[in-house]
Amino acid sequence: HFTTQRYNNNDSGFFGGSHSIRSSRPENDHQRILETSQRFKRRSDYDLEQAIRDCRSVRDIVILCIKEESNMQTFHISTCWCQVSRCLSKNKKELKENPGLLNHLLTLTVETCDKMGSRSLSTTSHRMAKIGLASELEVWNAVEKKAVELTAHDSKDISNILWAFAKVGRKSPVLFDHFSNLDITHMDTFNSQDISNTVWSFARVDHRSPVIFAAAADEAIKKLETFTPQAISNTIRSYVLVRHTSPKLFDVMAGEAVKKMSTFTPQNTCLTLWSYATVGHSSPALFDAAAREAAKNMYKFTPQYLCNTLWSFAKLRHRSPELFDAAALECIQKINQFSSRHISNTLWSYATLNHPSPELFQAATQQLSKDLSSFNEQNLTSLLWSLAVMDCEVESAVLVLNHILDCHKSKKLRFSNMNRRQLHQANLWVAMEHEKGSPIPDDLADEWRHAFTTPQGRTPSKFRTNVISTFQSLDDYDVLERIICEQTGYNIDVIVDKKNGAEIAIEVNGPPRYVERDLPTGSTVLKQRQLSNHPGGRPLLSVPHWNWNELGNQAEQQDFLLTEIKKLLSKVL
């Protein structure tokens, strides 16, 4: 530990190698330090602080600490850490080449920690975290002990100490609970950066504090205009990570983000959109503004940012053809840098929004032949489902199905019921739509079909109930509710003509089935295609919600349904 590694015990130099405890310093080094201290006149506090700032390497700082140890005040220690941080930002190799270089300064910090005030403690912990000193448990324990003893804190000090512990991954329930009580009374003194850092810290260590997040939301709304793009994205993301809902905060933050969207970095854009999509908070103005800016700067987006941005649009069913066209070109250029998750989530986004991009899908499927071992269950499922929705070259799907079969035999993969439902659809696409021999054996295909046909326990919508009741009011037709299509396994409603026994499948499509008017989602396209294309399939009548909403009474609804049935049967005949 660093408390026993203060001085070197070999001849290779002052730092590095094995170390002895403090009482066993090498005599030659010990004498040299004493002689130097005797010759060295006592500096004033200001001169010593300036001398620390004048150091140009970590080694110089540590040597100065040793020479001036008796003159060191607590603020000198924090100044040392500030200067260490500056030096390492210019020469990161110095600490890697000398791992024990900071041992003396760490020891001094532990020894003086109980004398530190709020500002020195804040600065010291902040700079240690910035350097990345996560494994030095003794110094963090000392900081924690002193922090909870202090009752008077500046808002900046509170946010910096919490940020430091979160940055190095130090979960400290005692510390975060202590500051939870302080933060409530201090929140009106927090600026936008303090608020952002505080909620980020709580989220980073997964410390739930509804009171803090509620108070932070109220204060953030008051100081909205001072939030930078990074503060906006970090704040919103923090609320998502701790699952604290604040619709008003999300609404006003979206408005502020729209005003400042031209200054957002790809990371700010990606994290903000991801946060809104994850909690399902729709904000068309925000997504439109983000799409305009992102389309112009798509070359700046990494594969991670591309993937997550596209996923966010798809998750909220927000269509942006210009963005998706520009992103497709960028994805193709960077496809070799895409991970398995990037590939599957990107294709899923295009398929979900029913946005064709043959060139992108071709480039992505060419990557599949290189290696499928890095794809997990969700990646493989999303990939296959996306290929099925966009009706791509079936050979790529067969390749993936063969891989899944191999993993199934070796029991390497375990698919969830939701995965199995989508795998059933993909297998239908290969075996039924393309009449291609699927490599999936009957027992595994039956397992997927069983998951697909198992009721999900969803409550029928009022829209569907209204449509079915109108069908039931027609004298010439009987209605069969919730029957399973034998060929596909889909759950459908069927009407039967009493005169000739002809059957028509009914698909009641509410708002969730569409990206926008006249543009169905990928899942809707796949279902309608598979219900219509199987041998001996029933004619399929789709009832869109916007047509139905324009009808005034049941008589108009009956006329509408009879007209649609007549149109459908004339096409079939």
Image (spheres, helix red, strand yellow):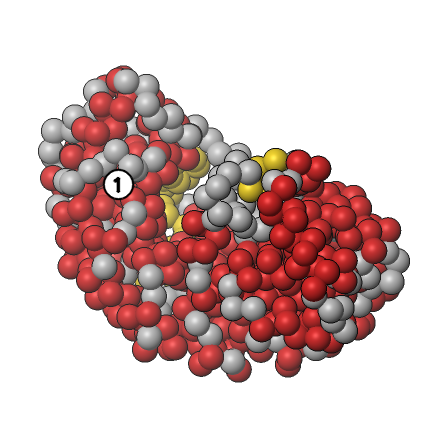
Q: Is residue 294 above or below residue 452?
A: below
Q: Is residue 124 left or right of residue 54?
A: right
Q: Closer to the camera, 38 or 534?
A: 38
Q: Which residue is mark 1?
A: 384
Residue 56 percent location from the top left of the image: 52, 68
Instruction: Confirm whether residue 455 shows in the render.
Output: yes
Q: Which residue is at a point 61% across and 75% down the rendered structure image?
A: 227
Residue 132 percent location from the top left of the image: 55, 52
- Tally of numbered tags: 1
Instruction: Confirm whether residue 205 shows in the render.
Output: no
Q: Closer to the camera, 302 or 520?
A: 302
The N terminus, quarter of image:
top right
Residue 218 percent location from the top left of the image: 75, 68
Q: Closer to the camera, 457 or 194?
A: 194
Number of other residues with Cα within 10 Å of mark 1, as a class: few under 14, some 14 to 19, many 20 or more: many
Q: Is residue 200 left or right of residue 549?
A: right
Q: Is residue 369 above or below residue 245?
A: above
The quarter of the displayed image where residue 136 is located: top right
Q: Which residue is at a point 43% across and 49% down the rendered structure image?
A: 97
Q: Amino acid at mark 1?
A: Leu
Q: Is residue 212 left or right of residue 515?
A: right
Q: Residue furthest right?
A: 151
Q: Is residue 304 above or below residue 407?
A: below
Element at label 1 = helix
Q: Which residue is at a point 58% across and 51% down the rendered structure image?
A: 102
Q: Is residue 180 left or right of residue 81?
A: right
Q: Closer to the camera, 278 or 410?
A: 410
Q: Which residue is at a point 32% across and 23% down the rendered structure image?
A: 412
The quarter of the displayed image where residue 58 is located: bottom right
Residue 530 percent location from the top left of the image: 25, 42
